[in-house]
Image (tube, helix red, strand yellow):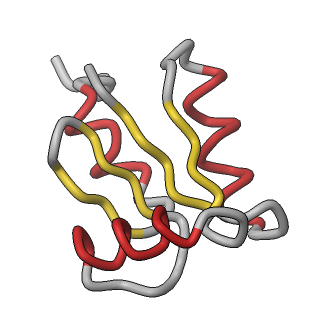
């Protein structure tokens, strides 16, 4: 699974989403849009959003720390 997290160093929701992924032992690539203008352009092209965090999970775009949607896409849901 290919996961990219578009974020900034100071964004509290970005920090939370990355901590959540790490806690669940999910590897991801991080792109800081403040340091990488191309990443910012790429993120806005994919999501239509200027705010972070934005996750790209195998082409599925999730805006914000939407835990329910992240779990659904990653099949982390505890539903039986």
Q: Quadrant of the N terminus?
A: top left
Q: Which of these two is toward me, 8 or 62? A: 8
Residue 22 position in % (x across, y down): 64, 24
**Location of residue 19 (image quadrant):** top right
Q: Quadrant of the C terminus?
A: top left
Q: Residue at x 45, y 86 (%)?
A: 50
Q: Does residue 11 appear to the left or right of 61 in the view shown?
A: right
Q: Is residue 24 above or below residue 58?
A: above
Q: Is residue 11 above or below residue 65?
A: below
Q: Does residue 35 appear to the left or right of 72 in the view shown?
A: right
Q: Which of these two is toward me, 80 or 67? A: 67
Q: Is residue 70 above or below residue 53?
A: above
Q: Is residue 56 above or below residue 46?
A: above
Residue 76 position in % (x across, y down): 32, 24
Q: Residue at x 23, y 68 (%)?
A: 46
Residue 44 position in % (x across, y down): 34, 78
**Location of residue 30 (image quadrant):** top right
């Amino acid at each position: 699974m290919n996961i990219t997290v578009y974020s900034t160093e100071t964004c509290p929701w970005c920090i939370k989403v990355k901590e959540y992924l790490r806690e669940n032992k999910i590897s991801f690539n991080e792109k800081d849009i403040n340091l990488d203008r191309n990443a910012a352009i790429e993120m806005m092209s994919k999501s239509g959003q200027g705010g972070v965090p934005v996750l790209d999970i195998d082409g599925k775009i999730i805006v914000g720390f939407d835990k329910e949607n992240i779990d659904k896409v990653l099949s982390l849901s505890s539903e039986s």
